[in-house]
Image: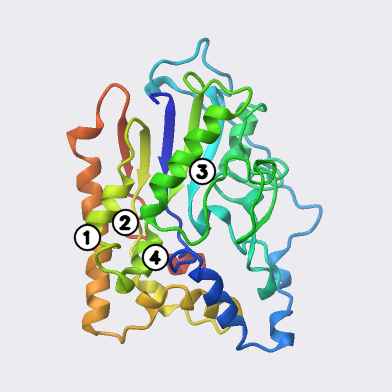
Amino acid sequence: MEWLWIAVATCVLVPHSVKGNDWWGEYEEGIRHYSKEALNKEFPEKTRPASFKHPVFQCPDMSPSPSVPSSVEFVKAADIKVIAALGDSLTTSIGANATTVLGIPIEFRHVSWSIGGYGSFKDVITLANILKLFNPNLVGAAPGKTVHGMQAHISETGFNLAVTGHNTFNLPSQTRHLIDTLRGYEGLNFEKDWKLVTILMGMNDICDYCKDKALFSADNFIHYMTVPRMIVNVAQILPMQTLREVQKPTPGCLLQRSFCSCLIEPVAGSPELQELVEVNLEFQKKLEALLHSDRFFRDNFAVVHQPFLKHADPRASR
């Protein structure tokens, strides 16, 4: 597995939380409180003019290495043959392009920031579309949409194997699914092809912390984030307390608040809120300690810590 390069990242939006299939129950309960008119209200700001195109991408070196690199230190963007992603709703991009509340259950995997393969870089800026500029034959970019709770084929998901509502303890099963998928995919050389896998995990653990403090502890978070024999680039989890200040009274924002009840419901200054803030900080500290330890620097495994979200304010993305 020394050829598997994994980039672990977090996003500045709270993922849809709640263990397993509880997400759907929360959604159905939430929309019962809105009128038919409110549920079908269009949000035109979600769309762009049909003629919109991003500027031309420029890079001084877009060529592959003369031979397949034997170390991640020498891998260039054009050397990456396969792209994949694991995680939760931030990677399934559930509701990302929805123009009404009723469109929230649609998973817009084809525009997911880490693996969406819709159109080209000029249409949608995703990591996959950037890499396709370097290697037009890149395999795995998500080509289409799926619906939450319904089985989807790889022709729709690509190698976007994230599952809406999953927590960190689901990461080992997602990883196994990915490995089995890559091993059995025709045309891939599992041992020699460089693979870029992006993982977003951990935010749901904080959102669900008050429901099971042992399962969603900082120690368990670290335990399940430790995947052996991979090269990992890890971005720090962001502080989530400021999400309590998101007060826009739209159905979408109100639903979003219900998905992270452990963060939203405690009274300001309460011991429950203070505990959650401390747990959030503990997640950050233990992740840093884990990634700066010597255990991850071997011939076939290395970790790079990216701290840019450590002091991020998620309100800026609203």
For disc 1, the neighbor class at 10 Å (few under 14, some 14 to 19, many from 20) is some
Disc 1 or 4, which lies upstream in sequence?
1
For disc 2, the neighbor class at 10 Å (few under 14, some 14 to 19, many from 20) is some
- Residue 298 placement (x, y as % from top left): 25, 25
Disc 3 or 1, which lies upstream in sequence?
3
Disc 3 or 2, which lies upstream in sequence?
3
For disc 3, the neighbor class at 10 Å (few under 14, some 14 to 19, many from 20) is many
Q: Is residue 47 at least partly visible in the picture?
A: yes
**Residue 313 marker:** 4
> Could you give the CA–CA distance between mark 1 and mark 4, rounded to whole angstroms?
18 Å
- Residue 22 placement (x, y as % from top left): 49, 70
Q: Nearer the viewer, mark 3 or mark 4?
A: 3
> Could you give the CA–CA distance between mark 4 and mark 2, rounded to whole angstroms?
9 Å
Q: Nearer the viewer, mark 3 or mark 1?
A: 3
Q: Which residue is tagged 3?
A: 85
Secondary structure of the residue carrying numbered label 3 = strand
Instruction: Look at the numbered discs 1 and 4 and tell me whether their residues touch, using CB distance below 8 Å.
Output: no
Instruction: Look at the numbered discs 3 and 4 and tell me whether their residues touch, using CB distance below 8 Å.
Output: no
Instruction: Look at the numbered discs 4 and 2 and tell me whether their residues touch, using CB distance below 8 Å.
Output: no
Disc 2 or 1, which lies upstream in sequence?
1
- Which kind of residue does numbered mark 2 sit on? Lys
**Residue 310 marker:** 2
Disc 3 or 4, which lies upstream in sequence?
3
- Which kind of residue does numbered mark 1 sit on? Glu
Secondary structure of the residue carrying numbered label 4 = loop
> Could you give the CA–CA distance between mark 3 and mark 4, rounded to whole angstroms?
25 Å
Residue plotted at (26% across, 55% down): 220
